[in-house]
Image: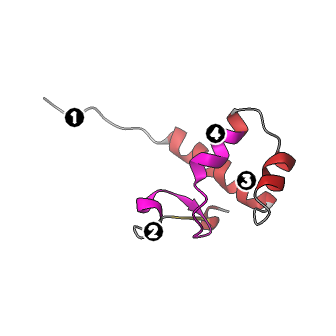
């Protein structure tokens, strides 16, 4: 599923996008957080597929699991 998320320095300054498009993962996550339904989002972005939204959520889950260690002073 995460293969749908691409990071290319030549597209959107290397921010995560969906299938190499200019549609940012953060855009989809923000729309979901704002209360839009999957159907509403897919109506606004006709090239979007349900698995693309799932991939965005999976990407967010992976980031939420990522832990960083504070840098030593």
Front tag of 4 and 1: 4
Quarter of the image with the C terminus in it: top left
Q: Which mark is residue 54?
A: 3
Spatial separation of the CA atoms under disc 4 and disc 1: 30 Å
Q: Residue 69's x, y, as percent? A: 31, 35
Q: Secondary structure at mark 4?
A: helix
Q: Do the numbered discs 4 and 3 sit on residues whose CB atoms are within 8 Å?
A: no
Q: Residue furthest front?
A: 44
Q: Secondary structure at mark 2?
A: loop
Q: Residue 18's x, y, as percent? A: 62, 62
Q: What range is drawn magenta here?
A: 12-31
Q: Earlier in the sequence, mark 2 or mark 1?
A: 2
Q: Which mark is residue 8?
A: 2
Front tag of 2 and 3: 2
Q: Secondary structure at mark 1?
A: loop
Q: Secondary structure at mark 3?
A: helix
Reply yes or no: does residue 29 show up in magenta.
Answer: yes
Spatial separation of the CA atoms under disc 2 and disc 1: 28 Å
Q: Earlier in the sequence, mark 4 or mark 1?
A: 4
Residue plotted at (65% across, 52% down): 56
Which residue was labeled with disc 1?
71
Front tag of 3 and 1: 3
Q: Residues within 10 Å of mark 1 (few under 14, many from 20)?
A: few
Q: Residue 21's x, y, as percent? A: 60, 68
Residue 4, picture quadrant: bottom right
What coloring was used for the rendering?
secondary structure
Q: In the picture provided, is 71 more to the left or to the right than 26?
A: left
Front tag of 2 and 1: 2
Spatial separation of the CA atoms under disc 3 and disc 1: 33 Å
Q: Does 73 appear above or below 42? A: above
Q: Residues within 10 Å of mark 2 (few under 14, many from 20)?
A: few
Q: Earlier in the sequence, mark 4 or mark 3?
A: 4
């Amino acid at each position: 599923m995460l293969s749908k998320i691409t990071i290319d320095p030549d597209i959107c300054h290397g921010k995560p996008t969906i299938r190499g498009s200019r549609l940012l993962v953060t855009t989809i996550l923000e729309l979901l957080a704002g209360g839009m339904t999957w159907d509403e989002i897919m109506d606004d972005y006709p090239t979007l597929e349900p698995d693309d939204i799932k991939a965005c959520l999976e990407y967010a889950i992976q980031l939420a699991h990522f832990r960083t260690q504070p840098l030593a002073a």
